[in-house]
Amino acid sequence: MATFISVPLKKSSEVDLVKPLSKFVTATYPAGDEQGEYIRAVEELNKLRRNALGRPLDKHESSLEILLRYYDQLCAVEPKFPFSENQLCLTFTWKDAFDKGSLFGGSVKLALASLGYEKTCVLFNAAALASQIASEQNLDNDEGLKAAAKYYQLASGAFGHIKDTVLSALNREPTMDISPETVGTLSHIMLAQAQEVIFLKATSDKMKDAVIAKLANQAADFYGDAFKQCQYKDNLPKYFYFQEVLPVLAAKHCIMQANAELHQSILAKQKKRFGEEIARLQHAAELVKTVASRYDEYVSVKDLSDKINRALTAAKKDNDFIYHDRVPEVKDLEHIGKAALVRATAITPPISQKFTDLFEKMVPMAVQQSMSIYSQRKAETVNRLVGTMREATNLCNGVLASLNLPAALEDLSGDSIPQSIAEKARSIVQQGGLQSIEQLIRDLPELLTRNREILDESLKMLDDEETTDNELRTKFNQRWNRTPSGDLYKPLRTEGANFSNILDKAVQADQVVKDRYNTHCDMIALLCKSESELNAAIPSANPTKTLQGSEVVNVLRSQLAQLDEIKKERETLEGEIKAVTFDMSITFLTALAQDGAINEEQLSGSQLDQLYGAYNQRVQASLRTQEELLGQVQTSHQEFSSLKQSNTEANQREEVLKKLASAHDSYVEISNNLREGTKFYNDLTEILLKFQNKCSDIVFARKTERDELLKDLQQSIAREPSAPSFNVPAYQSTPAAPAGGPTPAPRTVFQQQPQQAQQQPQAKPPPPARPPPPSFTPQAASTAPTSAAPTGPPSSNPPPMAPPSQAQGPPYPSYQGYPGYYQMPMGYNPYAYGQYNMPNMPNMPNMPYMPYQATPGQGGYPAAPPTGQPYPGYPQQPPQQQPYYPQQ
């Protein structure tokens, strides 16, 4: 490993940013130049990610600039898009930088639908690349030293920033490389290396020894802290990377401390403290000697060791012959001061010097959401004012229709169609009459059904994915460690339930309109007829021409004219109210920049009061004027009615004229309601299609995440043992033997102590088949008398016998062609070597006799037993005895 430590980069999987971000832009912003500009910016962002993460990066400042630009762009774009699992879901997959994986499972990786996770990993790579660039610098010149110190401090700051933000950015357990413990340790290491570079620069610039000693001592302190971080974190040493880093940190700690002592000894010499000089040089020499003996393969200290030794030799010589100063103990020396001239670079975007926000004109999501809520508040204000005026107008029309005005003033002849009724009939015909209303009524169920289908299909997608997620969660239990779909879909289900309630209320409103149409259908149909048919349908009455020039008629006509003027003013006022516009984005952006948050309710309320306060006063004044005029009209009408000659024909005619006037007003209102209902359903269709796309996107992202997680689970399951470890029964651990026969010990070439002879041997495969033993008698066994061999074979199934009280010795091996060693049958021992000692084998004790034991299923040895005693059996031997014996 190099003297300076660098960090490897994380690897990321490819992610398509264009499709989801472009879909969001298309759905959020209207078609036009602004939308096209944002889509081009999305393509540039995707290209920037490929350049930063999709190819190997050179250890050069230009490569680091690309990474920092991408990180800055992520920070700039984060508040402008709703990146989350249940809105704009983008899954980023990164591998552990230090885990090299296994043959079957691959390296550890983590996939999360979190832009904070992407930012964390990109910043980790920026820090790692900065450490690599710093380690490549030429430290023999001033520029290289400055660049190395700068990049090490940047790396330290980036790792420290990850330590502070990773848990809040991920909301779950990260991989080990970006865990707070790991990046905290890396931050300490980078800062220590930056301090060492400053020490090297001070040495190169030949600064005062007191300053250099403090710099070196501070570097030693930093390295000591980093070493402790590595040593005391349980999870870090498991990485091969940190196993290599530990000795380097320990060596650097000693080297920096030795440098501090060396330069402090020069300072002591200048102050005529020769004993202190020698003590410090001796301490430095011991430190360097420790490095050379323990960490020589990592760090070379030959030059430093020679320098210290030369200085120590000269100091001792001068002190012995000239100064004779007492050499103090190291513990009694004054502590060397510390001077930290480096600090971790603060990570405050933008970090890149060439950063330009691709989405500069796009407002943040907080402003977008505030603008959306403001638009809703504005629409509610407008609808309230307009609705108030329309209700007042409908009330006025209803009162006049109930009084048969102005038809009663126009019908003084008693046999012709009043002018107002004729105009209303022509108006209905021009608007399409009954056919237009009936067509609108027929269209409503189709629009409703279409919206229902879109909503049901969207919710069904969520239901299906949630069912699959629950099944896999039940199957894998805690291994299925992603966010439950039920929790993730709560906002979407709330939104879907809201849409369902809206549709239910719309159905009720449709029914109210239909009922009203059915009530006035006959009169509307009458108004649609020709003038002659309409005149014939209206009953005639006695003329009241005597009232033609009366004062009460003139007063009524004047009052009705004033009411008509109020209605026209309301139409103008309604247009003005709807035309009011104001860009609240500047107000919200200013509040966000100043306070870091937006108090939308307060800002919107204040602005709406300012915009619509005057209009609200005009509406209220119009209502008061209308109320006064209607009171006057009712009074005048009572006087007019008292002057008219009342009879049955006149009453019937007046009743029909009232119904015709009311039918016209109902026609106008029903037509408006139906057109508004049609527009409502069409607008709701667009909203539901966006909702469906949102559900489709999140379900697709969840399926992709599910497939990745299943793949990882399959790999982890493949790496696990197929069954838990268990103890093999004794009868399976050794070659099969009858109940009455001995159990042979396994062969081995390792010797054990005698007290281990009773331990359970390990299972070994059975030895190969052996030929019959040679027919000869060892010399050492000649003392035992023998008899003639039996003429027939022994019984193949002898009766069982009790096992011996001691364990068998190792069986004889069969080595083909090995001189002096013979193949022996597994269950027999023709050598009565228990009768003699083996002085040439010190590990074998003298063996006693063992009684012969017959093995079921195997014939006996083809020779008669000695007179008066059975065949000797196997002697007691340690199970780890050497597997061969010399021929006696």
Image (cartoon, rainbow, N blue to C red):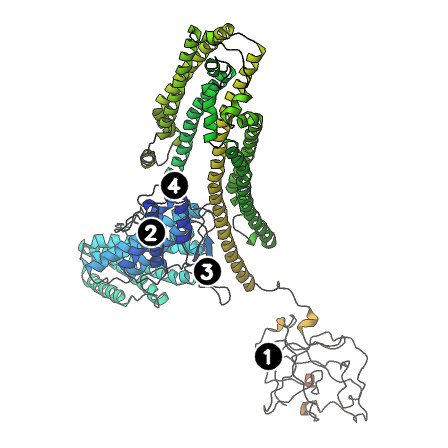
Residue 279 visible within the image: no
Residue type for callout 4: Met
Name which residue lies at 19% across and 59% down.
142
Which residue was labeled with disc 1?
A: 843
Q: Nearer the viewer, mark 1 or mark 4?
A: 4
Residue hosting label 3:
238
According to the image, label 2 marks what residue? 40
Q: Are marks 3 and 4 in contact (CB under 8 Å)?
A: no
Q: Residue 774 is drawn in which quadrant?
A: bottom right
Q: Amino acid at mark 2?
A: Arg
Foreground disc of the pair 2, 4: 2
Nearest the viewer among 574 and 304 is 574
The residue indicated by pointer 4 is: 365
Residue 49 vertical position relative to residue 600 in the rendered view, above or below: below
Q: Nearer the viewer, mark 3 or mark 1?
A: 3
Give the CA separation, mark 2 to mark 4: 19 Å
- Which is nearer the eye, 590 or 363? 363
Closer mark to the observer between disc 2 and disc 3: 2
Of 435 and 815, which appears nearest the observer?
Answer: 435
Disc 3 to disc 1, how far (Cα)? 43 Å
Look at the numbered disc 4 and give the secondary structure of its residue. Answer: helix
Q: Quadrant of the N terminus?
A: bottom left
Element carrying mark 2: helix
Residue type highlighted by circle 1: Asn
| Residue at 67% from the left image edge and 92% from the top image edge | 779
The Cα–Cα distance between marks 3 and 4, rounded to whole angstroms, is 43 Å
Circle 3: element type: loop
Instruction: From the top left corner, tell me how far across and down residue 390 is, in percent.
Output: 45, 23
* Cα distance between the residues tagged 1 and 2: 86 Å
Q: Earlier in the sequence, mark 3 or mark 4?
A: 3
